[in-house]
């Protein structure tokens, strides 16, 4: 229902993937047990997929997968499922953002880029480029690099 209210430009989105650590427990709510993975084990993390419109204020969580040990393969499988869902509701994903966790790096390099890190990959279904980036950690790495070389202090003293 929400997507129907968006114009074609607002449907151009960034897919944000993040893992959230949760208490390892189950709860009985509304007639169902919450906190279990598909295999019946208790989840310790939630793998969340969110979209953010590039041209508007729209943002929403589109999928949550309870996990206990996330692997690059599991992340890739979830990503394929989410991308299919987003295409079905007419979203146009142009970029994927993940943080710098080891599993995410392995997912990007091995699963999306075929072993060699690239700035973008081609979506096998649409043929359009999907840009890959981690803006928060990119800025942090640049800052730490300058900080360790004391470049900022040099410029302030000159």
Image (cartoon, helix red, strand yellow):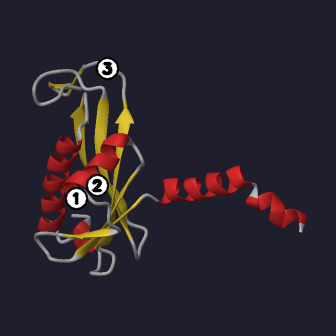
Nearest to the eye among marks 3 and 2: give it.
Answer: 2
Seen from the viewer's position, the closer of residues 152 and 9 is 152
Which residue is label 2 attached to? 108
Q: Residue furthest bottom?
A: 8
Q: Which numbered disc, 3 or 1, marks the residue that appears first in the sequence?
A: 3
Could one spot residue 62 in this view of the protein? no
Q: Secondary structure at mark 3?
A: loop
Give percent across and percent down for residue 3.
Answer: 24, 68
Which residue is label 1 attached to? 112
Residue shown at 32%/47% (left/top)?
A: 104
104 sits to left or right of 124: right
Nearest to the eye among marks 3 and 1: give it.
Answer: 1
Q: CA distance from mark 2 to mark 1?
A: 5 Å
Give percent across and percent down for residue 53.
Answer: 37, 69
Residue shown at 28%/54% (left/top)?
A: 109
In the rendered view of the protein, which quadrant contains the N terminus?
bottom left
Question: Do labels 2 and 1 touch, CB within 8 Å?
Answer: yes
Question: Do labels 3 and 2 touch, CB within 8 Å?
Answer: no
Q: CA distance from mark 3 to mark 2?
A: 28 Å
In the rendered view of the protein, which quadrant contains the C terminus?
bottom right
Q: Residue furthest right?
A: 157
Tell me which corner region of the image, top left, top right, bottom left or bottom right, holds residue 139: bottom right
Instruction: Find residue 24 and name its label.
Output: 3
């Amino acid at each position: 229902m929400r997507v129907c209210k968006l114009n074609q430009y607002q449907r151009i989105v960034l897919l944000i993937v993040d893992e959230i650590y949760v208490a390892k427990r189950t709860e009985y709510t509304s007639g169902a047990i919450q906190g279990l993975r598909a295999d019946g084990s208790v989840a310790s993390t939630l793998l969340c997929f969110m979209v953010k419109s590039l041209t508007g204020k729209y943002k929403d969580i589109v999928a949550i997968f309870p996990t206990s040990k996330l692997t690059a393969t599991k992340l890739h499988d979830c990503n394929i499922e989410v991308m299919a869902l987003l295409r079905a509701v007419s979203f146009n994903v142009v970029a994927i953002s993940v943080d710098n966790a080891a599993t995410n790096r392995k997912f990007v390099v091995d699963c999306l880029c075929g072993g060699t890190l690239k700035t973008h990959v081609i979506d096998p279904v649409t043929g359009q480029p999907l840009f890959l980036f981690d803006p928060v950690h990119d800025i942090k790495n640049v800052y730490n690099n300058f900080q360790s070389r004391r470049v900022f202090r040099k410029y302030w003293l000159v």
